[in-house]
Amino acid sequence: MPEHPSSGGESHSQSAAAPDPRLAFVYAEAVRGLQHQQNVVESLNTRAGNLIFATAFVSSLLGGRALAEGLGLWGWLALALLFLIGLLVVIMLWPYYAFTFRFDPEQLLQDFVDQNPSETMDGMHRALALRIKTDMASNWRIIQRLRVSLQLALFLLLLELLAWLFAIARV
């Protein structure tokens, strides 16, 4: 490496090793994966809202017509399905505080400044990428539960629609 004169007229070479761009890349990809997970959660919440609208629309439009002629077997089934869809929507929209999409600044200061002030950026990138992997695994369990709840609720909505139609047709 070329030597640069210091302010005192002495020359010195750079003693620190060059940062490893691979670690920065791995860290950036880990952060991107975590952001993707956060977008998935937001998308599932939006879909749950759309499900509420669709269920309300189907129930009010077809349910009103079916219940005008009395409550039969299909009407009771449709109401039970409406209740189950409501439970699944509550599961989907329940505020889960176990999601981890950010680092705690106090913990970062403690881990990388207070306890280990000589930690390099490469070391920080490596440690944080591994922490993100753990957080993503924890988040994924909740996301899977939300995804399955949404799929089941959509299936129940289809069954509710059919039950209301059968109630109207008096099948």
Image: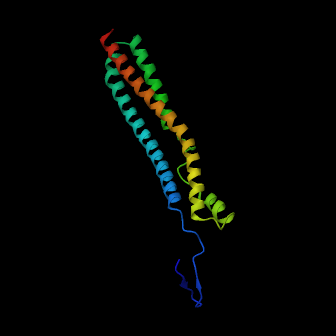
Which of the 4 image quadrants contains residue 46?
top left
Residue pictured at 56% horizontal, 47% vertical: 133
Residue pictured at 48% horizontal, 48% vertical: 33
Q: Nearer the viewer, residue 157 or 66?
A: 157
Q: Nearer the viewer, residue 25 or 32?
A: 25
Q: x%, y% of residue 9?
A: 58, 91
Relative to 155, say whether 47 is above or below.
below
Residue pictured at 64% horizontal, 65% vertical: 113
Task: Answer whether residue 37 is visible to the viewer in this image.
Answer: yes
Q: x%, y% of residue 83?
A: 46, 24
Which of the 4 image quadrants contains residue 104?
bottom right
Relative to 171, say whether 34 is above or below.
below
Q: Nearer the viewer, residue 106 or 9?
A: 9
Residue lying farthest to the bottom in this orientation: 9
Residue lying farthest to the front in this orientation: 1
Q: x%, y% of residue 122?
A: 57, 62
Residue pictured at 39% horizontal, 13% vertical: 74
Relative to 134, say whether 92 is above or below.
above
54 relative to 91 in the view: left or right: left
111 relative to 43 in the view: left or right: right
Q: x%, y% of residue 93?
A: 48, 37
Quadrant location, the C terminus: top left
Task: Answer whether residue 71 is visible to the viewer in this image.
Answer: no
